[in-house]
Image (tube, grey):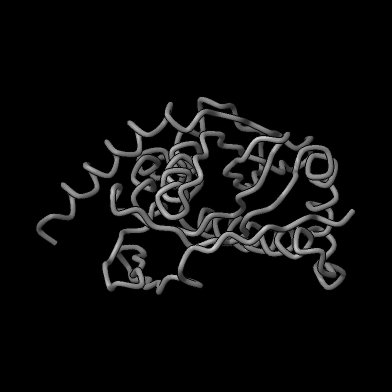
């Protein structure tokens, strides 16, 4: 199938990103700097990640993390090319399989696409980031985030995913005037069927704002 695209003018093509040891920042066309929403929300998982690393050991943890990161990046790339109606034959077999796993969900629910890998920012939130996909999902304008996982995750395990999507929804409305309240997480899971979770943006803004305050408190004297 051919996916339909409707370009929405943001007034800029991209944001300048800068990655350091302390995280990533973005600079808007007027020169204002914003902390990455991913960097801010990463503090929600610090304790669980530290516990996991202590359990499996640093060497194994580093190996698993690197593999997961590489796979996640490649899966995002193949999905982006597929949704742009481009050729995806040059990817490795296991990455192609992830796309095959997700295709039924994409074909059933994904409608008009407004943006892919779109750089967004919000002066209200003081945050910026790059959103996987802004499109209609089951006919409703939505923020859609693509995830990969080694095991199935329950909704209660991924509040940071919904907070991230909710932040993108606010950024998108601030930049375009188009309200979006539907946040969709589409997850490819190893040896399991794909999972789709949907949430309302407003259910997770408080968590995002509280986490931003905590991040700012930690970094105020750095």
**Most foreground residue, 11 or 87:** 11
The vertical placement of 60 against 101, above or below, is below
In the displayed structure image, the side of residue 135 where residue 202 appears, left or right: left
Residue 117: x, y in percent? 58, 61
Residue 178: x, y in percent? 51, 45
Residue 123: x, y in percent? 29, 54
In the displayed structure image, the side of residue 205 where residue 212 appears, left or right: left
Q: Residue at x 13, y 55 (%)?
A: 220
Residue 128: x, y in percent? 38, 57
On-image quarter of the C terminus = bottom left
**Most foreground residue, 205 or 207:** 205
Q: Residue reaching furthest right?
A: 1
Q: How many numbered circles are shown?
A: 0
The vertical placement of 221 against 147, above or below, is below
Q: Residue at x 29, y 38 (%)?
A: 209
Q: Residue at x 43, y 70 (%)?
A: 15
Q: Residue reaching furthest left?
A: 221
**Most foreground residue, 126 or 178:** 178
In the displayed structure image, the side of residue 104 where residue 161 appears, left or right: left
In the displayed structure image, the side of residue 153 where residue 15 appears, left or right: left
């Amino acid at each position: 199938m051919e996916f339909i695209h409707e370009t929405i003018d943001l007034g800029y093509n991209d944001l300048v990103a800068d990655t350091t040891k302390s995280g990533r920042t973005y600079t808007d066309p007027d020169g204002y700097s914003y902390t990455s929403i991913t960097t801010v929300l990463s503090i929600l998982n610090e304790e669980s990640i530290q516990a996991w690393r202590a359990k499996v050991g640093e060497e194994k943890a580093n190996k698993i993390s690197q593999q997961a990161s590489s796979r996640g990046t490649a899966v995002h790339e193949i999905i982006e090319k597929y949704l742009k109606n481009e050729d995806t034959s040059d990817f490795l077999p296991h990455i192609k399989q992830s796309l095959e796993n997700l295709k039924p969900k994409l074909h059933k629910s994904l409608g008009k696409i407004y943006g892919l890998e779109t750089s967004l920012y919000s002066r209200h939130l003081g945050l910026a980031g790059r959103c996987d996909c802004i499109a209609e999902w089951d006919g409703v304008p939505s923020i859609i985030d693509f995830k990969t996982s080694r095991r199935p995750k329950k909704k209660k395990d991924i509040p940071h995913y919904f907070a991230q999507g909710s932040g993108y929804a606010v950024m998108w409305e601030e930049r375009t005037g188009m309200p979006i309240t539907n946040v969709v997480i589409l997850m490819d899971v190893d040896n399991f069927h794909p999972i789709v979770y949907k949430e309302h943006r407003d259910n997770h803004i408080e968590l995002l704002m509280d986490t931003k305050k905590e991040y700012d408190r930690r970094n105020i004297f750095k």
